[in-house]
Amino acid sequence: MEKAQYGIIRFAKYKGSEIGKIEAHNERTKERYASNPDIDTSHSKYNFHLMEPHGKYRAEAEKQIAAAGCQTRKDSVRVVEVLFTASHEFFEGKKKSEIREYFEEALRFMEKYQPKETILSAVVHVDEKTPHMHLSFVPLTEDGRLCAKEIVGNKKKLIWWQDEFWKHMVQKYPDLERGESASETGRDHIPPRVFKEMTRLNKQREQLDRLLSGINPFNAKGKADEIGKLLDCYIPAVEKMQTQLTKYRGAFTKTTAENKVLKKKNEKLSETLEEAQSHSVIKQMQDMKLQRDYEAAVRALEAIPLEVLEMYACGDHRRKEQPIDKTR
């Protein structure tokens, strides 16, 4: 099974002396990093900047804040750091140029919402387990106020950031899923990975259907071993698909609601070919097909004769059959 590939964005706020500490980490100005054993300093020479710092983070931040005429307190947030990365599986097998392209796209995303001149540094680290970019900026608003709270926002705004980042990156990287925060938004998107897994499950179901074709009490024993080997893969795949469809149940609820609205519209307007090919309609059809395919996978299990299931449960297989709970 393919592992999920997540696009990730994280924010952190910094006020005073701590700014120097993150600069030392980001710019790799220390010889040793005892607090982070994952850093392989022999590979630090391969780190690269997409935006070079013009000077020390704190000094540059103070210069911009003063130029904007902002008054500050001791506890004012002067620098916001954004961590851009993806799940480790996303970067596996990628060349340095491909890794660079990912972070260049992430930088383009950030420049849509934060003036380029406020960005102090954008440096990509490849000397740790998973490549990532530290982008540091001065949190100045469009009207010249120093307000990290307004830019980064609360929990709801952080979810917005994650979703907007995913919407931007998925245009170029269609296999990427939303980061973890999107689970709080109802998960109204079913990722391409799930459809790929269903395609494999459909092939297994067709193979199972062929094995069950013409089975009877006289030849069941002869087919039981072959069926059992297939079920060792098929049953866990069905159970995993059930878990994923439960996770993305919001998508099916939304599809059903959209279909009702569409049906009412179609009573008044004849649907043209262009309308039928619109993204929203195609997405609804894909989501509904996914649900139907899953139900067909469960029915294939229900079609297995009892005597074959009994032989399978008693046989020497990696796992025993577990019932599929269709009520979840």
Image (cartoon, helix red, strand yellow):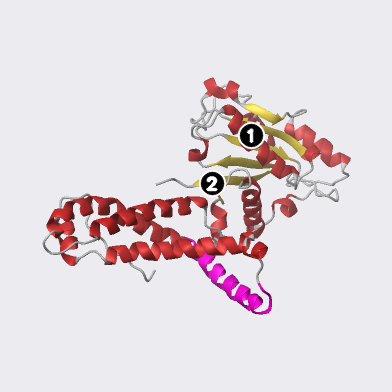
Q: Which range is magenta?
A: 248-270
Give the secondary structure at mark 1.
helix
> Disc 1 designates what residue?
101
Q: Is residue 110 left or right of residue 47?
A: right
Residue 124 visible, this angle = yes
Please check the rendered image and state whether residue 269 is part of the magenta-colored stretch, yes or no: yes
Q: Nearer the viewer, residue 138 or 301?
A: 301
Q: Is residue 30 above or below residue 115?
A: above
Tell me, for residue 169, which label it has, or none: none
- Outermost residue to the left: 218
Q: Quadrant of residue 17?
A: top right
Image quarter in which the C terminus is found: bottom left
Residue 79 visible, this angle = no
Query: Please, what is the three-letter code of the amino acid marked with disc 1?
Result: Glu
> Disc 2 designates what residue?
175
Give the mark nearest the N terminus, 2 or 1.
1
Q: Position of residue 4 (x, y in %)?
A: 48, 47
What residue is at 35 percent from the left and 54 percent from the top? 237
Are discs 2 and 1 less than 8 Å apart at CB?
no
CA gap between label 2 and label 1 equals 16 Å
Query: Please, what is the three-letter code of the amino acid marked with disc 2?
Result: Asp
Q: Quadrant of residue 99?
A: top right
Q: Nearer the viewer, residue 165 or 282?
A: 282
Q: Nearer the viewer, residue 162 or 213?
A: 213
- Prevailing SS of the magenta stretch: helix
Q: Position of residue 96 (x, y in %)?
A: 58, 28
What residue is at 17 percent from the left and 54 percent from the top? 223
Q: Position of residue 274 (x, y in %)?
A: 67, 62
Q: Nearer the viewer, residue 42 or 67?
A: 42
What residue is at 54 percent from the left and 71 percent from the top? 256
Q: Position of residue 258 (x, y in %)?
A: 60, 71
* Mark 1 nearby-residue class (10 Å; few <14, some 14–19, many ≥20): few
